[in-house]
Image (cartoon, rainbow, N blue to C red):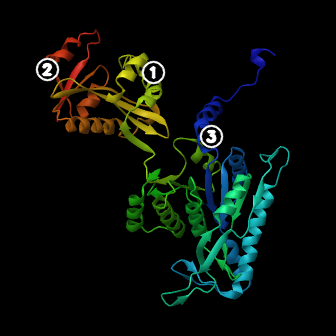
Amino acid sequence: MTNSAMPQINPEYVHWFRNSAPYINTHRGKTFVVMFGGEAVNHPNFSNLIHDFALLHSLGIKLVLVHGARPQIDKNLVEAAISTPLNNDIRVTPREAMPHILEAVGAIRLQIEAQLSMGLANSPMYGSRIDAVSGNFVTARPYGVRDGVDYQMTGEVRAIDVDAINNNLLHNHMVILGSMGYSATGEVFNLLAEDVALSAAIALNADKLIFLGAETGISDGDRLLPQMIPNEVARFLRDRDINIEINYFLHCASEACRQGVHRTHIISYAKDGALLEELFTRDGSGTLVSHDPYEEIRRANIDDVVGLLELLTPLEEQGILVKRTRERLEQEIDNYSVIERDGMILGSAALHQLDADAAEVACVAVHPEYRNGSRGADLLAFLEQQARSHGLHKLFVLTTRTAHWFVEQGFVEVSADELPAARREQYHNGRNSKVFQKTL
């Protein structure tokens, strides 16, 4: 076969697959609790979600699937002419409604198990072998009487059988939990699926809690919020009138953070591939609620040298930055600060002290795909704070291409004669850089 006759490979696919490798390695062996409602089961994209669950399972991720059944329960109860009023968004469940609720929940479980068992040729499930397990893993207690309302057979989670679930996960089973719980006296209670998912994630010390909802994530007007921390969640809930689903998700995400589940993702069940995009790309597809910012500015360490070289080399080749060898970076690493997102260095800057009163800002760089926004200014502010903490009052910067940007950050152009003596001796290197100064 000649080269011209060889099939062409999509470069975007190759790029994506290679860049997903760190996430594949990171997620392998981790436990994810994934919750979706009955609306997701009814959606045309649900079959694609099943395929994605199977893919995650094949990559060594331990999955606990938690499903709701609100629309299916509503349908059964309407047909049976049984009224189950909502009070504070919680269903009051009369005893006569339970057979119809059990039927709806059981039908969804069987549907999920059937789709996970599908192994048709020419389908994404071909060759997969998934043992889906469900059982009495959730112990419940009555929700009781609150504000004078008897919730009857509505319950809340009392305990999760962690040992039984972990044993099944250890044996490569996928665990399915419904919105039902069982009491020590043999009664069955109707639970909130969100409550089951939250309780399971906390009890299992899950690595991720994932909510699949109707929305892409959490939006502030037309703007998607890619990341939130618990304090921001509290303000968001206080200041806005939001729908019931998002309200549940955010309350659970905030509580999960407080209880040790470090990352909760809120994404769309309707968008094909949203789950994979969220888990295997740096920018994701929805909203991440986390105690620890997944993008942070910090002091660099020796492990960042490779990432710094990848960031800086293209700019050095263009003549924008002075070339720095690996050895020099290793020697001066304590002077550098970086912006990191999920293990990738997005930005860097260095602060080199020149004398007792001044320092030079150098090597300010931001990855080309992340230059929209304020990352450069944030790095500079981080260095300024370092300089102040060391009692310095002057910052210098030498640049050939980015003079205008530094002026916007409060620097003013000065003569090279203003540089401290030791730095002034090194100034004449043929680059003819402009010198700027900022007084702190």
Residue corresponding to mark 3:
24
Q: Report the residue at 34% width, 24% height from top.
A: 332
Q: Position of residue 50 (x, y in %)?
A: 72, 54
Residue corresponding to mark 2:
418
Q: Looking at numbered disc 1 in the image, what kind of residue is underneath it?
A: Pro
Residue corresponding to mark 1:
314
Q: Nearer the viewer, mark 1 or mark 3?
A: 3
Q: Position of residue 180 (x, y in %)?
A: 67, 73
The quarter of the image holding the N terminus is: top right
- Disc 1 residue crowd, few under 14, some 14–19, many 20+, Cα 10 Å: some
Q: Nearer the viewer, mark 3 or mark 2?
A: 3
* Contact flag, marks 1 and 3 (Cβ < 8 Å): no
Q: Report the residue at 68% width, 47% height from top.
A: 56
- Mark 3 or mark 2, earlier in chain: 3
The quarter of the image holding the C terminus is: top left
Mark 1 secondary-structure assignment: helix
Mark 2–mark 1 Cα distance, whole angstroms, equals 31 Å
In this image, 75 relative to 418: left or right?
A: right
Q: Looking at numbered disc 3 in the image, what kind of residue is underneath it?
A: Ile
- Total numbered badges shown on the rendered structure: 3
Q: Report the residue at 48% width, 66% height from top.
A: 251
Q: Is residue 309 visible?
A: yes
- Mark 1 or mark 3, earlier in chain: 3
Query: Which residue is at the far front?
Result: 163
